[in-house]
Image (cartoon, rainbow, N blue to C red):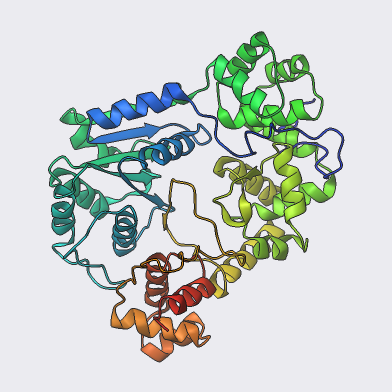
Amino acid sequence: MSDRSSELASPAALRPDARRRGRLTESVPAGRPLPRPRLLTALSRAVERAPMTLVSGPPGSGKTVLVATWAGRAAASTAVAWVRLGRDDVDVAEFWTAALSSLAGAGLPLPGVPRPVPGEPLPGDLVDRLAAALAAAPTPVVLVLDKADHLHGELVDGVHRLLGRSADRLRMVLTASADPLQLLGPSRRSGALAQIRGDQLAFRPPETRELLSRLGTPVSAGAAEELTAATDGSPTALVLAAAELARGVPAERLLADLAATDTAPVHHLAATVLAAQPPPLRRFLLRVSVSDHLWPDLVARLTGVPAPDRPLAALARAHAFVEADAGAPGGYRIPGLLRTLLAAQLDHEDPALAAVLRRQSADWYAATGPLNDGVMLAVPTAPPRAHPDGRGPRARPGAQVAVPDLSPREREVLHRLAGGDSTSRIATALALSTNTVRGHVRTLQRKLTSPDREGIIGRARELGLL
């Protein structure tokens, strides 16, 4: 394996009949995170001790996976809400709408808490009323803010006020690649901050050995110790190492190549794995890297592959950038760091094509796709069984289903969506800006727990709103 720092790489034979593909034990499906008792215990103790816990480390260090695993377990005994911030310019109303929806979805009663309206100032008493609802909760509530380094001034002030006025009933868990200093300052000074840093997130040799064994590429204890040192214990680098082992590269050769390069381990391994791909699969990976999510219809449009499940499944089996994830769109995901590396490679090789593909992706999201905004809800527990058409789960016959309260403007937007109007047509008809219409559609998405316009309409009809 040579040093190919100029070219990202993925695993080799990814066709379903490839002889060298990796194997997974049936008890651990691809993409399921490795339970790490050491870190799960540390995070539990941190949340018990301090109102605010920061889990920080570089991209690819496993912080979100750790917190999601912990949250999935904690949700069995306490309310856990999750909000992910996708960019720096998150709108204040977007954030608090997402926080309220997630807290309500976690079972927290929110009587009297006003709802933000897109395009309008935030209700002045929203944070205080939410704090009062939290203070009255029978058990502590955990709010996870994923990528909290995207929080800015006004949001930071609101988060601090919420935490300070919730009568010790709120626990916040933050994930961040860089310390959000403005957010952490008061808690750090008062001793109300617990931290799990990058050096704690790094894999230890026994964890490395267990991970590689679960991925179907077992190594000796000695090799696990050397691989841990060579990759700095990076979970992302270790999965890429598994891709090389799965295609028949001996552990000794893999270690020698890592020792011979000055490139960061994860970059070197990514380049090696991508370079090993057959040209069609390599093109497939680069093209899909322009989207955060692997929605099947979008992937088909970007790649020209009418049945993208087949290459995605093959890539996941070989531990090559793609992971199986039952909770992700289409059942697969590319971890953020790896997607960034693939996208950078596409920009380097063909910037014109990269621009075209990004425009295709943006147009798809704007026209018919899911809402690709800056604040996203996430449910850390296993998702319920979905409809055959991919939308949200149906209620059991006879079950009581809560019908969300929609504002008059949201109802107008809903009816125009059902009539097939585009965003621009709705904006013209209602004398609103397109950004305000998008905000209302995002609110409908959250209230109706549906990822796209079709899902919003279908769910609204199920609930008698149309």
- The structure residue drawn at horizontal position 64% and vertical position 17%, both measured from the top left corner, is 227
Camera sees residue 392: yes
**Pick the front one: 77 or 451:** 77
Camera sees residue 349: no
Q: Which quadrant is the N terminus positioned in?
A: top right
Q: Position of residue 50 (x, y in %)?
A: 23, 31
Left or right of 458 on screen, residue 151? left
The extreme bottom residue here reads 429
- The structure residue drawn at horizontal position 47% and vertical position 82%, both measured from the top left corner, is 417
Please determine whether, in this image, residue 112 is positioned above or below residue 207. below
Using the rendered view, name the quadrant where residue 56 is placed. top left
Using the rendered view, name the quadrant where residue 192 is placed. top left
The extreme top residue here reads 222
Left or right of 214 on screen, residue 453? left
Q: Which quadrant is the C terminus positioned in?
A: bottom left
**Pick the front one: 418 or 181:** 418
Using the rendered view, name the quadrant where residue 271 is placed. top right
Q: Position of residue 292 (x, y in %)?
A: 56, 54
Please determine whether, in this image, residue 209 is positioned above or below residue 18. above
**Pick the front one: 397 or 143:** 397
Tally of numbered discs: 0
Please determine whether, in this image, residue 218 is positioned above or below residue 14. above
Left or right of 254 on screen, residue 67? left
- The structure residue drawn at horizontal position 86% and vertical position 39%, both measured from the top left corner, is 18
- The structure residue drawn at horizontal position 54% and vertical position 74%, both measured from the top left corner, is 454
Q: Position of residue 357 (x, y in %)?
A: 67, 62
Q: Position of residue 158 (x, y in %)?
A: 21, 52
